[in-house]
Amino acid sequence: MTALSKTDQADATDAADATDTAETAETADGAAYDGTWADDAEPDDGSGPDDDEAGEPPPAARAPSGVAAGAAAVVGAALGFASLTGTWLADLVSARRELTGQLESANGTAAEQISAAYGAPWHTIALFNGLTAVVALIVSAAVLVRPAFGDSALRPVVWVRAVAVAGLVLGALGLVIAAVMRFDVFADLPTVPGQ
C-alpha cells in the first residue's frame, strides 16, 4: 500500500512538473499567448519605421505637395482658357481706354477718332490676354518641371500632369492670339474711305 502511494505520488509530481514546464514555455515573456505576438502588433501612433514602403516619404509629406501641384495645374489651365476668352479686368480696362480715347480725340481727325475709340481698346484687350497667357505658361510649366529641381518622389500624379499640359497648350494659343491682335496681323484698323 505504501509502495503504491509512492508511485501515485511520483506520477502526480511528474504531471505537475510537465504542466509547469508547458506554462513556463508558453508565458516566457510574462504574458499569456493570445493568438498574436508582440512583434505582430502595430504602433498606435503610426510612427513606426515600417509604416511606409522603403523610399517613400510619409503621407504627411506627400499630401501637401500633391494638393499644391493639383491646385497649380488647375489654376494654370483656367488662366490659359481665360487668355483665349478674355477676362473681366481686360474688358473693364478696355472700356475705360475707349472712353478716354473718345474724349481725347473729340476734335481730332476721323483716323485719330477710329484709333482712339477702336484701336486702343482692342490693343488693351490683347495686352491683358497676353499677360494672362504668360502667367498660365509660367504656372503650368512650374508644375511640370518642379520634380526636376526637388524630390523626384514628389512627381505629380497623371491627372495633374495632364491638366498642366492643357494649361501650357491653352496658354501658348492665348499668347499667339494676343500677339496677332496686338500687331493687327489679320485685321487692320478700319479706315475712312477716300483718306
Image (cartoon, rainbow, N blue to C red):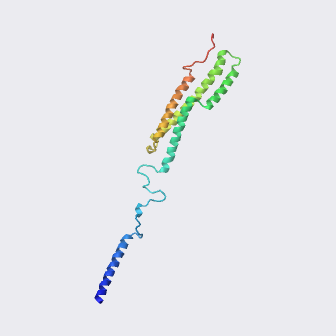
Q: Residue at x 66, y 25 (%)?
A: 97
Q: Farthest residue in the top direction?
A: 194
Q: Position of residue 177 (x, y in %)?
A: 54, 25
In this rendering, the answer to whether 130 lies above or below 59 is above
Where is the C terminus found, in terms of image quarters?
Answer: top right
Compared to 44, does 195 lie above or below?
A: above
> Left or right: 91 with respect to 143?
right
- The residue lying at 54 percent from left, 25 percent from top is 179
Q: Residue at x 40, y 62 (%)?
A: 39
Asked where in the image residue 121 lies, by quadrant, the reply is top right
Residue depicted at 31% across the width and 81% down the height: 11
Q: Is residue 84 above or below residue 41?
A: above
Q: Is residue 161 left or right of residue 17?
A: right
Quadrant containing the N terminus is: bottom left
In the image, residue 63 sits, relative to residue 6, either above or below, namely above
Extreme residue in the left direction: 3
Q: Is residue 190 left or right of residue 5?
A: right
The image quarter in which residue 113 lies:
top right
**Whole-percent x and y of residue 58?**
46, 51
Could you say which is closer to the camera, residue 110 or residue 152?
110
**Residue 42 x/y as whole percent:** 44, 59
- Where in the figure is residue 23, as x and y percent of width and height? 37, 73
